[in-house]
Image: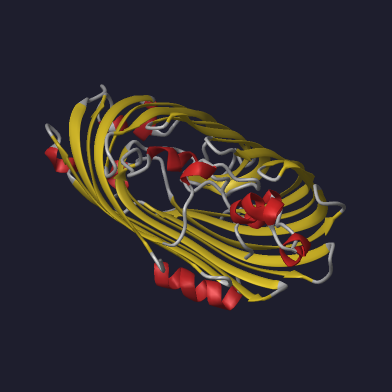
Amino acid sequence: MLLRACVFAVLSAVAVWSQVDTNATQANANPQDQARMLTPPPVNGEAYPTVPAAETRSNYLNAGLIFSAAYSDNVLGGITPNPVSDLSYSIWPTLALDETTPRLHSVLTYSPGFTFYQSTSARNEADHNVAIDVQYRLSPHVTASLRDSFQKSSNVFNQPDRLSTGAVYGSPQTPTAAVIVPMADRLTNAANAELTYQFSATGMVGADGTFTNLHYPNPSQVPGLYDSSSRGGSAFYSHRLSRKHYVGVLYQYSHILSYSVGAQSEVQTHTISGFYTIYLKPNLSLSLSGGPQYSDTTQGLLPALRSWAPAATASLGWQGRHTTFAASYSRIVTGGGGLIGAFHSNSANASARWQIARTWNVGLAGNYAIYKTLTPFFFLANPGGHTVSGTVSIQHQISEHFNAELGYTRLHQTFNGISVISANPDTNREYISISYQFTKPLGR
């Protein structure tokens, strides 16, 4: 799947220097850097930073090992009429490579995982998490980027970095999984390729292509849910009014396919929106975007459902020396994520991290999403529902190489007719982990 995404990226052409890196150095940049425009959050395809500036580093090789123990009160979801609780133990080898040159910034991370359950040993699992982010400046005015992430897991909560699942974006995102199944085999892949061109001191254009895929290898674990895939693209024009103010227009297209044995639906959307971003400080931005969205939804021989609806997004991101905070809200028509048909989606996300002392960090992440069907007469269509989730964690650096983390996650979902969660809609999970990390600087 990763190879497929890379080929897709080459054919699509790829995005701009990280907003975080540019923002953080803008105040001390040379005149050439000051002339370079930023790519505002509504069009850059990146998540807001989750690491405070004091902890941000580049040009390094990182290797480590994470051991985690967790207790969950709902490890089987709706497979049983009553919730089943269990203890689990996980081991996560980790590897990360960050290389930075004047024209290239590449980040590769890989973390396989092995989890063992005390009672429900049939759910023992081996996981894989791979991510690549390459940003290359083809010329002083043209930048390309490729991002791809692949995940194989049977536990949506079992991640090396729990807060990373609450990533906040400045643009609407097609949900990889609208319905969160606590325990089920799952394969996901998301790729993005972008190319930007700054043709004047105040003007920039760009285009990108995206691909996502959600696959449940064992359908018996997820009754009521379906595989899905999406592909799409966008083009934008951005104008810099001043050092702090950016405006522009964005066109987005998406094609979302949901399918299972005996049922399939397609959702196509076209969105034209204007956006405005203000950089209140080099590391603090506020973005607004909105416009009309046209959707065309089909299923088999049924008449197509076509409609217009307003689409809107608002986001805020701040990366301080010892604190990060990001929040977003979006209203769009979408599909996929395990559901058949098209849905009005309203979602809000927030994440924060504070370095409260030299060796102590506190993190928070939360999500709320509500889905209402546009296609109630489609075969196997679901009326929709809502999801509320949150994670809080505290981290302590024991020594130069050892860290400890304690955290709690709460999930509540309401989706009538989806048996995998309707019987047991709530999940509570507590975890503790000890990690060893070794970092070697590169090129020094």
Q: Residue 432 falls in which quadrant of the image? A: top left
Residue 415 in view of the camera: no
* x and y percentages locating residue 402 in the rendered image: 26, 40
Q: Residue 413 falls in which quadrant of the image? A: top left
| Image mark count | 0
| The N terminus sits in image quarter | bottom left
Q: Is residue 4 above or below residue 271?
A: below
* x and y percentages locating residue 190 in the rendered image: 48, 58
Which residue appears at 15% of the width and 35% of the height?
120
User: Is 320 left or right of 51, judged from the image as shown?
Assistant: right
User: Is 311 left or right of 87, judged from the image as shown?
Assistant: right
| The C terminus sits in image quarter | bottom left
Q: Nearer the viewer, residue 268 or 298?
A: 268
The outermost residue toward the right is 241
Residue 325 in view of the camera: yes
Q: Nearer the viewer, residue 273 or 241?
A: 241
